[in-house]
Amino acid sequence: MYDHILIPTDGSDLAQRGVDQGLSLAKALGSKVSIVTATQPIAVPPVGMVESWAGSSWDVAGYDDHQKKLADSILSQAQESAARLGIAAAVVYVPDALPALAIISTAEERGCDLIVMASHGRRGVKRLLLGSQTAEVLAHSHVPVLVVR
């Protein structure tokens, strides 16, 4: 039914529920698995505040190095979860990207036919204020999405 499942994670406990469910489904179906994490670009101050911020190349390089280490840690943990179930999961790190867009593009590039991800299930004002990567993926993905709560 599903030959290649994409499982996004940000390393949080909530995301781990999505990882666990996605891996269990992959094991039951004998599906290939790719696990993706993305890190957002460095925040640049708004116009008008730029004069007071004198970012250096070290700031950017330091940020990039930190984000890469964080991503490696997140993906390593998810890969260990897969290995415990006997699944060889490919890992993908997408730097400097909005998470929802990274998830959608990775699913398309890798030929995934299902995305399994977790969601808080927030509604109304909380969802508007806090945003939802899951809602963005649901709204824009051409690949089916299974949401775990």
Image: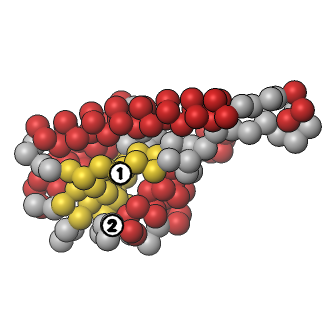
Q: Earlier in the sequence, mark 2 or mark 1?
A: 1
Q: Badge 2: few (under 14), some or many (20 or more) residues near its Cα, within 10 Å?
A: few
Quarter of the image holding residue 18?
top left
> Is residue 41 in view from this perspective?
yes
x then y, percent, for residue 55: 74, 31
Q: Describe the element under mark 1 as helix, strand or loop.
A: strand
Above or below, 103 against 84 in this view is below
Viewer-proximal residue among 48 and 113: 48
Quarter of the image holding residue 51?
top right
- The residue depicted at 32 percent of the width and 40 percent of the height is 75
Name the side, left or right, on which 51 lies relative to 65. right
- The residue depicted at 51 percent of the width and 42 percent of the height is 39
> Is residue 135 in view from this perspective?
no
Is the C-beta separation of discs 2 and 1 under 8 Å? yes
Name the side, left or right, on which 59 lies relative to 122. right
Q: Which residue is mark 1?
A: 92
